[in-house]
Amino acid sequence: MLLSTTADAADPPSRANAIAAADAAAGLPAAQDPGVPVCATPPESGRKLAGDMELGSEGHSIELQNSGMRDALVKIRHADSGRLAASFFLRRQEAMSIEGVPDGRYLIQYAFGPALAPDCKSFTRILKANQMPEADDMITQVIDDDEHTEVKRSSVSYDISVSESANVKPVAIDAAAFNAE
């Protein structure tokens, strides 16, 4: 089950200027070149775009909050092979919850871009890409004793942004590493 929440709609001009100034201070390039083709109908936040991960009715959960001022693509990779497990679109200032994640060891990557490309699954260009510094081990534990049976599943939560002040310091990766299938 995927859930998403929305935030504000259009930015007033003064807010847009403040966002542009913050992006410039963070070293991000200016907005999208108007001559580049873009996705005609961007997906809603939380929609799975690609990958071999089959989400179940039971499993682990991953919660993500996009605190950035740009839309993000989030990729979950199998830590052992680097192969793409799943990718999702996450609009700026929105959150999503990925439920039913199967057992595995996963790396979480994310990137910000000015606009989705015509395939609606990638950015026209990547402004900044990061990866969480450690893989997340998501293994179901079953505790079975004389009194009860208990099933424990993992839940991780990340706030993604271009800020360097978060409690988890992501590792910068290049666009090629992020775009790899």
Image: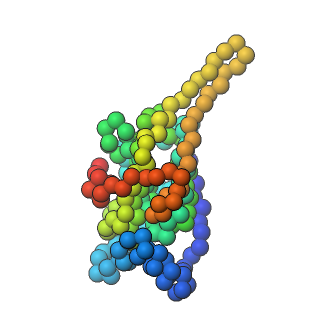
Q: Residue at x 39, y 55 (%)?
A: 130
Specify the quadrant of the image occupied by residue 57: top right
Image coords of residue 121 (percent x, y) = 36, 60
Where 48 sits versus 140, above or below? below
Q: Which residue of the protein is positioned furthest toward the top in this rendering?
A: 146
Image coords of residue 21 (percent x, y) = 46, 79
Q: Which residue of the protein is positioned furthest toward the bottom in this rendering?
A: 13
Where 50 sits versus 92, above or below? above
On the picture, is 28 further left or further right than 70?
Answer: left
Figure disc tally: 0
Q: Nearer the viewer, residue 33 or 39?
A: 33
Image coords of residue 48 (percent x, y) = 44, 53
On the picture, is 115 further left or further right than 16?
Answer: left
Q: Residue at x 59, y 69 (%)?
A: 7
Residue 131 seen: yes
Residue 41 seen: no
Q: How is the image coloured?
A: rainbow
Q: Nearer the viewer, residue 32 or 54?
A: 32
Where 138 sits versus 174, above or below? above
Q: Nearer the viewer, residue 40 or 181?
A: 181
Q: Which residue of the protein is positioned furthest toward the right in this rendering?
A: 147
Image coords of residue 63 (percent x, y) = 55, 50
Q: Residue at x 43, y 40 (%)?
A: 135
On the picture, is 112 further left or further right than 92?
Answer: left
Q: Residue at x 55, y 66 (%)?
A: 93
